[in-house]
């Protein structure tokens, strides 16, 4: 069966986020006052597998080994069945 996986990767609380700081400064120059800006990265892909738990376990392993740095990142995994 084919599954769609989505991984949302964000910085852990307290980690410096230069991208978010740049966005806040640029918006301030445009006269928009915003605070607590955060950025996330979303990675989407499809996989074949026997069941959702197996896919979720494999995606978790991918995150731990390659997609993010568990020391500085949090990640959320969403797995859904593909309509194909």
Image (tube, grey):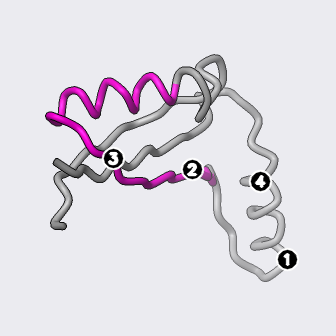
Q: Which of pointers 4 and 2 lies earlier in the amino acid sequence? A: 4
Q: Position of residue 27 (x, y in %)?
A: 75, 73
Q: Quadrant of residue 49?
A: top left
- Residue 42, x across and y down, in percent: 51, 53
- Residue with the mark numbered 4: 19
Residues tagged 3 and 2 counted as in contact (Cβ below 8 A): no
Crowding at dot 2, Cα within 10 Å, few <14 / some 14-19 / many 20+, comes out as some
User: Which labelled disc corresponds to residue 47?
Assistant: 3
Mark 1: few, some, or many residues within 10 Å (few <14, many ≥20)?
few
Label at residue 40: 2
Please give the residue where the numbered disc 1 appears in the rendered image: 29
- Disc 2 or 1, which lies upstream in sequence? 1
Could you give the CA–CA distance between mark 3 and mark 2, rounded to whole angstroms?
22 Å
Instruction: Verify whether residue 31 appears in magenta.
Output: no
Q: Nearer the viewer, mark 3 or mark 2?
A: 3
Q: Earlier in the sequence, mark 3 or mark 4?
A: 4
Who comes first in sequence, dot 3 or dot 2? 2
The numbered mark, 4 or 1, whose residue comes first in the sequence reads 4
Residue 32 appears at what percent x and percent y? 69, 76
Q: Residue at x 59, y 20 (%)?
A: 70
- The boundaries of the magenta stretch are 37-63
Q: CA distance from mark 1 to mark 3?
A: 43 Å
Q: Is residue 6 above or below residue 73?
A: below
Give the secondary structure at mark 4. helix
Gap between marks 4 and 2 measured at Cα = 10 Å
């Amino acid at each position: 069966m084919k599954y769609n996986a989505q991984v949302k990767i964000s910085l852990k609380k307290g980690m410096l986020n230069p991208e978010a700081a740049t966005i806040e400064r640029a918006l301030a120059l445009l006269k928009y006052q915003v605070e607590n800006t955060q950025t996330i990265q979303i990675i989407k892909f499809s996989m074949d597998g026997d069941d959702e738990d197996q896919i979720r376990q494999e995606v978790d392993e991918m995150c731990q080994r390659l997609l993010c740095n568990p020391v500085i990142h949090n990640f959320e995994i969403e797995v859904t069945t593909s309509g194909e």
